[in-house]
Amino acid sequence: MNAVQRFDTRAWVLFAIMALVWGIPYLFIKVAVDSYSPAAVVAGRTLIGAVLLLPFALRQKALRAAFSKIGWVLAFGAIEMAGPFLLLGHAEQTLPSGLTGLLVATVPLFAALIAFGGGDRSVLRPARAGGLVIGFAGVAVIVAGPGLAIEGGGGLIAVGEVLLVAVLYAIAPFIVAHKLKDVPALGTITLSLFAVGIFYLPIGLLTQHQVPTLDATLALIALGVVCTAVAFIVFFALIARVGPVRAPLFTYVNPVVAIILGTIILGEHLTLGLLIGFPLVILGCWLAATGGTIRTRDVEAESERAPDLPPVAPG
C-alpha cells in the first residue's frame, strides 16, 4: 500500500471534515425550508456551489471534457442533484433532519440491489445478502417500530421520498462509471450544479411566497458554501489521499452527525424505533457494500480504475 492509500493524520482530518460537512446538510435543509420553498433551496445551494467551484474547474481545465458529454452530465445532474435535492427539501418539511440523514444512508443497500440486477452475483454471498436483510429490517423498525419515528400519512410519503433519494444516489455512480469515467469529476459536478441551479431558479422564484428569515438564509448559504463547494474540494483531496474505495467510508458516520445535531440543535426526539433501527441500518449497509471487509488489493485496483470518482450521497 503506498502513501496515497494510507490513513495518516492528514487523511483522518479530511475524513472527519467530510463526516461533518455531509452529515450537517440535513440540519441546514430543515432550517432553510422553514421559509424558503424546496425549489428555492435547490437553486440557491447549487448556484452558490457552482460559482465557488468554477475557478477550480477552470484551473484544472475540467469543463471541456464535461461539455463533450453534456447529455450524460445533465443526466447525472438530474439523478444526483435535481431530483434528490428537491425531494429532500420537501421531505424535511415533515421529517426530522436526523431521520432523513439516516434514511439517505441506505444508499449502499439499493446500490447492491442495482448491482445484482446488472449481473453482480457477489451480492448473494452470505455477508452481503445478510446485510441487505438487516439493513431493510432496520428501515422497517424505524418507520413502523416502537415509538413511531414518523406520524401520519404525510410522514410515510416523506419517508418514501427520502428512500427514492437513496435509490437515485445509488444509480448516479453507475452513470459516472460507465458513461463519464473519462471526464474529470470536478468538471462533471461543476457543470451539473450550474445546470440544476439555472433550471430551478425560475421555479424557485415562482414558488417563494414569503420573506425568508435570517436563519433560513444563513442555512441556505451554508448549504452552498460548506456542504457543496467546500465538501467536494475536501472529498477530492481525500480521494487523492486514500483512494476512491475507502474515501466514501465517512458516509457511515454522516447519519450519526445528522441525528446528534438534530437532537441537540433542533430538539428532535430520539424514538425507540430510531434507536433500534439505526445500528441495524448502518450494519446492514456496511455488510451489503463491503461484505464486512475492504482488502488492500481492492483499494489498489479501484484506485487505478477510478481515481476521480464522485461521491455517492452529498446530502
Image (tube, rainbow, N blue to C red):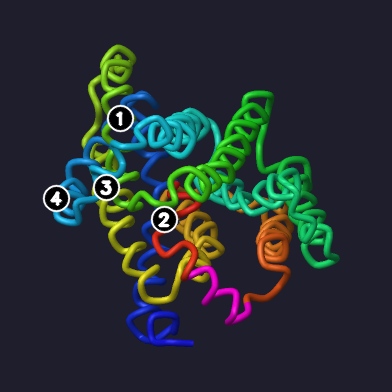
Specify whether residue 58 is painted magenta: no
Q: Position of residue 88 (x, y in %)?
A: 48, 35
Task: Report the amino acid beneath label 1.
Answer: Ala
Kindly state the secondary structure of the residue where label 4 is placed. Answer: helix
Q: Earlier in the sequence, mark 1 or mark 3?
A: 1
Question: Of callouts 3 and 4, which one flags the residue occurring earlier in the amino acid sequence?
Answer: 4
Q: Residues within 10 Å of mark 1 (few under 14, many from 20)?
A: many
Q: Quadrant of residue 67?
A: top left
* 4 or 2: tag closer to the N-terminus: 2
Determine the CA span between mark 4 and mark 2.
22 Å
Amino acid of disc 2: Trp
Residue 115 badge: none
Please give the label number shown on residue 22: 2
CA–CA distance between discs 3 and 2?
Answer: 12 Å
Task: Please check the rendered image and state whether residue 301 is part of the magenta-colored stretch, yes or no.
Answer: yes
Mark positioned earlier in the residue sequence (3 or 2):
2
Q: Nearer the viewer, mark 1 or mark 2?
A: 1
Observer-nearest of 299 and 31: 299
What residue is rendered at 18% in x and 54% in y? Answer: 56
Query: Which stretch appears magenta?
Result: 295-303
Q: Which residue is mark 1?
A: 195
